[in-house]
């Protein structure tokens, strides 16, 4: 088969080689990382300029590319590849590590360089041997028995003939050849009747454009999920991958029968009725219903009890038919199901399909995304009816992952000879792909085609069309809104009603009716038993809370009291931890602004430690601790200590120091702030701390402010007079700036400097006379209101 193989590329560097190179790139310079998809491989390229010492090695987590020096790798240009699921960057000492996560466990990685570029090729299938004579250096912790690849090549004698190898070399060579033959001789899964090689060719195969690049017999590592041997720990550190099973565990070949539908149905029902035990006949009828997409009927047939003495083969057949019917009915299957079990001595090539379907039914979208390329290849060997039904189940579990949806829909895009209800399903799936790709014209076209049917998928298409028409300001828009409301009410306990409620809530959110959007999203979340729908409703509710409390984005918001009431009603949708802390921060700020420090303190104490470590989080919690009755002013001061000095931090420090009984220190914290509120607070703290001279000066400066309201001016005048009298300090202030109060003017006259009195009895008499004068000019205290009867 070498003639059919693609031309071998230029020799690449060995996998674990460490090459000497010029000086590494300057620290701090961004190194661009790009990727490109080729027909037979995926390539990741690093534009280094000057290539530093580096190495590539396989680990259980993926392929690690280690570069000497602390480099800044830019992954923004890294596109998704068939052979790559993700990449991570980390620093280990003076090394930069780029971890590439292949999409297949048997992907081989090859390292190469050209000019100032360093690249890694990821290929499916067993790793290619390095060129003869290129011996990679042994890892520091590799086992001593790990021989270099070049040692497997026997030395050549005269005329190119190989010298006779040693006996121990023959054993290792024989095991290596047998392992490769097992991979090459893997038998593909048999196709059902009516599907020949022409159908597979029409869909693209091998490495042709549009094909999957995989044979029907999936390599064992991809099917079982087993890791490749790790060269870091020497041979035998991990179990070798199993060879693929030569025979599939079961086939759909006889499920539909060879007669027309009605004739086959009558024959199988009659056989079950005339049978004694009927287990084989029961399984045959259930399989017939399942392959014709009638899972309810199949489960009814299989509801009869099965004797414990039934043969294991028949019991396994019945369980398999039951599990496939449950998949079609969107019911979860047992994790111990035979469909998901590995074979004892070989790797089942069909496992990714069943595991992907099980993941779809449990809402495990990440697991489904990892296996999507293998599932697409396996779907081609499934009968057409089940292929479309399985693709529908799988696609329903994909929400916003356009790449995974595109891979799954590709398996049914070119199907022909579909029934009308199947055409509706395919058009619905294509409309979802067009929506995620941002192609509104194609979405509308496929939705219009799908909405013409009478199936459940057609109802979904109508709901989506109604959601798109909600933006219209005419009778069509009103009709669409009413249609969505009817869908949500009529099917409120079904996925269709949940989907309609979500679409309607999204429209309310865009319209700015945040309270109604929260109510509808909450109802959809509470009524749903599906994790994916619950998460969508929760995300929608969290989005509404962010508009209410974090960033309104131009919307007209309700009053503050109503916003806080909505938060307290739906605060459970603020994601716990750091992801939802922006909502809690916004709510706590609004509570403080509305004079609810204790509620703000409770909300701030729910913040994650990482949020409190940020300046905004620390300032907010310190303010709540300083203001709330149940707060801790010492904790407020501790939160402010590591923060840079700012006006906000000084105001909070003044509050905390005042609660700690240190008003003069609090006034010192406010010194130099020019805002009127800060000047008022500083004067009040000076007066509270009996710093009469500074208090008199502060109130005198405050009375010169023309924007002072009458009530504040009156209080400032009285306090100025009292502070000046107690400090015996004369204040030169025009009379028109004082509030019209005779007592304040008399106190100011008393504040004029008086000659110092002699010590002894004369000084005491002078102090008593001054006190009597001050008492005469001070206003009388207000009368105390009588306590209501019955209360102490």
Image (cartoon, grey):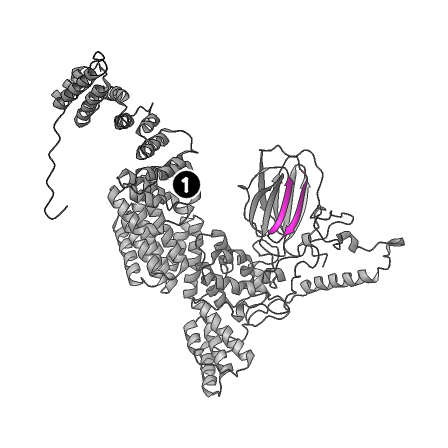
Prevailing SS of the magenta stretch: strand
- Residue 517, placed above or below residue 314: above
- Could you tell me which secondary element the residue under label 1 belongs to? helix
| Residue identifier under label 1 | 612
Q: Mark 1 packing: few (<14 Cα in 10 Å), some, or many (20+)? A: many
Toward the viewer: 718 or 645?
718
Image check: 97 left or right of 131?
A: left
User: Which region of the structure is painted magenta?
Assistant: 51-69
Q: List x then y, in percent, for residue 179.
A: 71, 63
Residue at x 54% of width, y 61% of height: 375
Asked if one can make out residue 559 in the rendered structure from this viewpoint, the answer is yes
Toward the viewer: 152 or 447?
152
Residue at x 53% of width, y 63% of height: 353
Tell me where residue 200 sits by quadrant: bottom right
Q: List x then y, in percent, for residue 19.
A: 71, 41
Image check: 375 left or right of 110?
A: left
Residue at x 55% of width, y 62% of height: 352
């Amino acid at each position: 088969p070498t003639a059919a193989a693609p031309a071998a590329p230029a020799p690449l560097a060995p996998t674990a080689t460490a090459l000497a190179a010029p000086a590494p790139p300057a620290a701090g310079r961004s190194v661009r990382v790009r990727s490109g998809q080729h027909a037979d491989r995926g390539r990741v390229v690093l534009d280094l300029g000057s290539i530093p010492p580096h190495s590539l090695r396989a680990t259980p987590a993926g392929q690690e590319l280690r570069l000497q020096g602390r480099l800044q790798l830019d992954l923004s240009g890294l596109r998704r590849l068939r052979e790559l699921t993700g990449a991570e960057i980390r620093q280990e000492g003076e090394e930069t590590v780029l971890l590439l996560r292949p999409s297949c466990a048997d992907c081989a990685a090859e390292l190469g360089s050209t000019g100032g570029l360093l690249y890694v090729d990821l290929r499916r299938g067993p790793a290619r041997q390095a060129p003869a004579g290129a011996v990679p250096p042994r890892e520091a912790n590799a086992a001593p028995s790990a021989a270099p690849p070049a040692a497997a090549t026997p030395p050549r004698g005269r005329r190119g003939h190989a010298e006779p190898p040693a006996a121990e070399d023959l054993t290792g060579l024989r095991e290596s050849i047998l392992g490769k033959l097992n991979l090459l001789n893997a038998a593909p899964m048999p196709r059902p009747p009516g599907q020949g090689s022409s159908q597979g060719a029409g869909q693209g195969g091998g490495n042709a454009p549009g094909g999957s690049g995989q044979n029907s017999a999936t390599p064992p590592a991809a099917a079982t999920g087993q890791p490749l041997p790790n060269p870091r720990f020497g041979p035998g550190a991990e179990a070798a991958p199993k060879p693929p099973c030569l025979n599939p565990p079961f086939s759909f070949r006889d499920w539909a029968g060879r007669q027309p539908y009605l004739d086959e149905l009558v024959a199988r029902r009659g056989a079950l009725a005339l049978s004694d035990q009927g287990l084989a006949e029961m399984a045959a009828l259930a399989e017939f219903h399942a392959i014709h997409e009638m899972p309810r009927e199949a489960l009814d047939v299989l509801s009869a009890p099965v004797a414990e003495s039934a043969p294991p083969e028949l019991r396994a057949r019945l369980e398999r038919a039951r599990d496939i019917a449950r998949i079609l009915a969107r019911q979860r299957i047992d994790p111990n199901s035979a469909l998901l079990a590995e074979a004892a001595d070989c790797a089942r090539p069909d496992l990714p399909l069943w595991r992907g379907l099980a993941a779809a039914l449990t809402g495990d979208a990440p697991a489904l995304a990892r296996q999507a390329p293998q599932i697409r290849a396996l779907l081609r060997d499934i009968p057409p009816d089940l292929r479309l039904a399985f693709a529908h189940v799988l696609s329903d579990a994909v929400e916003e992952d356009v790449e995974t949806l595109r891979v799954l829909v590709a398996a049914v895009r070119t199907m022909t000879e579909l029934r009308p209800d199947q055409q509706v399903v395919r058009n619905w799936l294509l409309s979802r792909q067009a929506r995620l790709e941002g192609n509104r014209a194609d979405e509308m076209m496929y939705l219009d085609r799908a909405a013409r049917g009478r199936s459940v998928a057609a109802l979904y298409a109508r709901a989506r069309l109604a959601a798109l028409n909600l933006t219209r300001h005419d009778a069509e828009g009103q009709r669409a809104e009413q249609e969505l409301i009817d869908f949500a009410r009529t099917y409120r306990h079904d996925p269709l009603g949940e989907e309609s409620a979500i679409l309607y809530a999204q429209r309310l959110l865009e319209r700015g009716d945040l309270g109604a959007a929260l109510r509808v999203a909450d109802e959809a979340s509470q009524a749903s038993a599906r994790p994916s729908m619950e998460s969508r409703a929760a995300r929608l509710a969290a989005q509404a809370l962010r508009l209410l409390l974090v960033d309104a984005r131009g919307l007209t918001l309700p009053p503050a009291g109503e916003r806080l009431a909505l938060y307290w009603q739906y605060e459970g949708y603020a994601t716990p931890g750091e992801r939802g802390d922006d909502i809690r921060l916004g709510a706590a700020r609004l509570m403080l602004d509305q004079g609810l420090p204790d509620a703000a303190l409770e909300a701030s104490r729910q913040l994650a430690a990482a949020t409190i470590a940020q300046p905004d989080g620390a300032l907010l919690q310190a303010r709540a601790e300083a203001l709330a009755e149940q707060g801790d002013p010492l904790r407020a001061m501790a939160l402010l200590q590591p923060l840079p000095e700012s006006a906000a931090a000084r105001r909070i420090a003044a509050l905390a120091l005042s609660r700690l009984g240190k008003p003069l220190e609090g006034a010192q914290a406010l010194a130099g702030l020019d805002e009127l509120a800060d000047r008022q607070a500083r004067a009040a703290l000076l007066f509270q701390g009996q710093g009469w001279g500074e208090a008199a000066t502060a109130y005198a400066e405050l009375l010169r402010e023309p924007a002072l309201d009458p009530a504040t001016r009156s209080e400032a005048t009285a306090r100025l007079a009292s502070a000046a009298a107690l400090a015996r300090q004369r204040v030169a202030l025009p009379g028109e700036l004082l509030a019209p109060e005779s007592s304040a003017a008399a106190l100011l006259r008393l504040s004029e400097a008086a000659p110092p009195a002699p010590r002894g009895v004369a000084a005491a008499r002078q102090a008593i006379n001054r006190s009597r004068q001050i008492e005469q000019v001070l206003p009388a205290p207000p009368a105390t209101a009588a306590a209501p009867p019955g209360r102490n």
